[in-house]
Amino acid sequence: MLLVVPSMRSCKGRIHSFESFGTLDGPGVRYVVFLQGCPLHCKFCHNPDTWPSNGGTEYTAGAVFDKIMRCRSYIATGGVTLSGGEPLLQAGFCEALLGLLCDAGIHTAIDTSGAIPLNKSSKAIELADMLLLDIKSPCSVACKELTGQGNENALATLEFCESIGKRVWLRHVVVPGITYDEASLIEVGKLAKQYSCVEKLDLLKYHKLGASKWESLGIADPLTNTPALSAEEFAHAKEIVEYNKNKG
Ligand code: SF4
């Protein structure tokens, strides 16, 4: 049990939205808190409306905690996931909310791109039970082209999780013509094999469902001419990754 101090409850953060019955963001049924703000601009982002740090609505950690507790019976076999945007951009707020949740015995996960340097993010990572870490690309140059930032912080985050034995589920979005690339997929598989903290690797299919959001925000969609990943391509990508993850 942590020592919950009053300042934890009053710590303020900006929230994009809530989902009280999430089934895709960690183990079991989860309450998902989508935090506002993201330092990356991934070309395949489904939620570009989360990008501006000054958007969303301001809440205290105590108010968010109270909202979650009203749904506690739904999440008894799951927990709470802090997602975004990039939740660790508001690391202090994450620490406060995670502290409250940890004290209440609720399982917690952070869904992150790992883009935030460890001198800001490590305390929140230590407080969470697990990370869902989205590796945008195993190649830093390709990562910068895809997201606007290299992958050094994400790889350092993975190293940090390994050093403290933090449970990690890796995620990787497969985009035709970008990350649907044999050499890149081999490296993703190897990355999952290399770290014992990685319990699972989820490949995610690029789809076009976010395209309307780019349009409604008046931002040019950089992948407007990129098709969704087909079922065959996805199966092939999975084969490459699984083979390299499991080979002796
Ligand atoms: S890290 Fe997530 S929220 Fe941020 S730009 Fe990338 S996909 Fe969008």
Image (cartoon, helix red, strand yellow):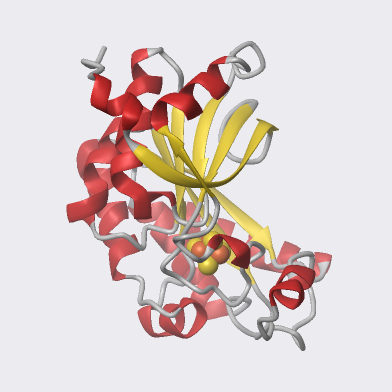
Quarter holding the N terminus? top left
Residue appearing at x 51%, y 36% in the figure: 81
Asked if one can make out residue 243 in the rendered structure from this viewpoint, the answer is no
Left or right of residue 111: residue 96: left
As drawn, is 2 to the left or to the right of 43?
A: left
Task: Let me know if residue 84 appears in the view.
Answer: yes
Q: Relative to 226, is 79 on the left or the right?
A: left
Percent of width and height locating residue 65: 47, 23
Image quadrant where one finds the C terminus: bottom left
What residue is drawn where x is 23% and y is 46%?
A: 122
Residue 222 drawn above or below residue 211: below
Residue 111, position as x, y percentages in the image: 48, 46
Using the rendered view, name the quadrant where residue 141 is placed: bottom left
Q: Quadrant of residue 61?
A: top left
Could you tell me how many numbered marks the image carries?
Answer: 0
Residue 204 vs residue 232, the one in the foreground: 204
Decide which of 241, 111 is in the foreground and name it: 111
- Reply above or below: 193 against 166: below
Taking the image as shown, residue 214 lies to the left or right of residue 60, namely right
| Identity of the residue drawn at 50% across and 53% down | 36
Instruction: Indicate the position of residue 86 as horizontal and vertical percent values.
Output: 45, 56
Query: Where does the image place residue 9, in percent across and percent down from the top left?
Result: 34, 25
Relative height, residue 198 to residue 179 (above, below): above
Q: Tell me if residue 6 comes above or below residue 94 in the rendering.
A: above
